[in-house]
Image (cartoon, rainbow, N blue to C red):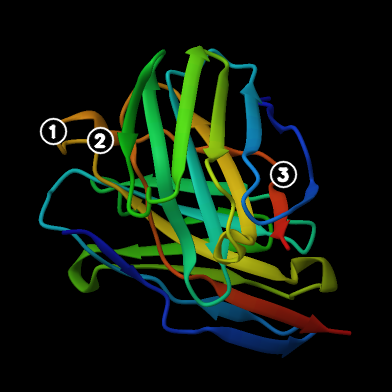
């Protein structure tokens, strides 16, 4: 069975602070994909990044960076110099496309971390 | 850019009504999904469809049905709405290849009175 755990339910930081959102996953498969989504107060989920299990290289996109470590089954997300516009709920998700059957495109979501950036 | 459009942002219905939530995507995606989102529970999959007229139950299908008559449209139906179906409903689509990201609509906040 697959599982995604985001242990931090809510985080508050002051603007310009760095913040890391944790994501720990469980899967028995060697081929899988990990995702991060952002859900601002307006409600839509916005896709941020996808990582496959064979690519452990960390990624940086502007103020966002992601640290993927297979040894600890973690895919953490860091926002540098946070801004008020970063306030949102962030979801980590796992996809195992090797699962046989029509369910192979499902995502297993964590319960989300609500980030509040205080001006 | 992928566009997933949900017919309503806000909807208020009464207990016992039959409710239709519509979702349309413009990227010719094979797979479409309906989730509900509740505080503390995250996103839970209700139903998904991997082709026209094909559907599979997700984690919480009870009280819901779906329809996919055309590739671009996936409808969620509440057969007899109840107050415990008050929630945020999110539609998503994804291409056929495994490991592709799901693209979401803006969501429908449904209140059942």
Q: What residue is disc 3 on?
A: B106
**Residue at left offset 52%, top offset 70%:** A112
**Residue at left offset 50%, top offset 41%:** B34
Answer whether labels 3 and 1 touch (C-beta < 8 Å): no
Neighbours of disc 1 within 10 Å: few (<14), some (14-19), many (20+) = few
Q: What residue is disc 2 on?
A: A104
Q: Is residue A46 above or below residue B54?
A: below
User: CA gap, disc 3 to disc 2?
Assistant: 24 Å
Residue A46 in the image: x percent, y percent? 64, 48
Label 3 sits on a secondary structure element that is: loop
Neighbours of disc 2 within 10 Å: few (<14), some (14-19), many (20+) = some
Q: Quadrant of the C terminus of chain B?
A: bottom right
Q: Chain of mark 1?
A: A
Q: Nearer the viewer, residue A65 or A85?
A: A85
Q: Is residue B66 visible?
A: yes
Q: Place residue B72 in its image quadrant.
A: top right
Answer whether labels 2 and 1 touch (C-beta < 8 Å): yes
Q: Chain of mark 3?
A: B
Q: Chain of mark 2?
A: A
Q: Is residue A58 visible?
A: no
Q: Quadrant of the N terminus of chain B?
A: top right
Residue B8 in the image: x percent, y percent? 78, 39
| A66 to the left or right of B4 | left
Label 1 sits on a secondary structure element that is: loop
Residue B33 in the image: x percent, y percent? 47, 37
Q: What residue is disc 1 on?
A: A100
User: CA gap, disc 2 to disc 1?
Assistant: 6 Å
Tell me the number on the disc at residue A31: none
**Residue at left offset 12%, top offset 50%:** A29
Answer whether labels 3 and 2 touch (C-beta < 8 Å): no
């Amino acid at each position: 069975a697959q599982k995604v755990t985001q242990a931090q339910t809510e985080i508050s930081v002051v603007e310009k602070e760095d913040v890391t959102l944790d994501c720990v996953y469980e899967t028995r498969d060697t081929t899988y994909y990990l995702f991060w989504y952002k859900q601002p107060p307006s409600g839509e989920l916005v896709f941020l990044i996808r990582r496959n299990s064979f690519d452990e290289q960390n990624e940086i996109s502007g103020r966002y960076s992601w640290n993927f470590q297979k040894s600890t089954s973690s895919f953490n997300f860091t926002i540098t110099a946070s801004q008020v516009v970063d306030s949102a709920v962030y979801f980590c998700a796992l996809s195992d496309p090797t699962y046989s059957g029509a369910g192979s495109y499902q995502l297993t979501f964590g319960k989300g971390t609500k980030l509040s950036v205080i001006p | 850019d992928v566009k997933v459009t949900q017919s309503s942002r806000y909807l208020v219905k009464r207990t016992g009504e039959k409710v239709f939530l519509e979702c349309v995507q413009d990227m010719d995606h094979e797979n479409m999904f309906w989730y509900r989102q509740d505080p503390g529970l995250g996103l839970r999959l209700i139903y998904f469809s991997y082709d026209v007229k094909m559907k599979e139950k997700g984690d919480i299908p009870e009280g819901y049905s779906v329809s996919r008559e055309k590739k671009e449209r996936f409808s969620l139906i509440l057969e007899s709405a109840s107050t415990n179906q008050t929630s945020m409903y999110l539609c998503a689509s994804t291409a056929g290849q495994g490991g592709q990201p799901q693209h979401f609509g803006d969501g429908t906040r449904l209140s059942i009175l």
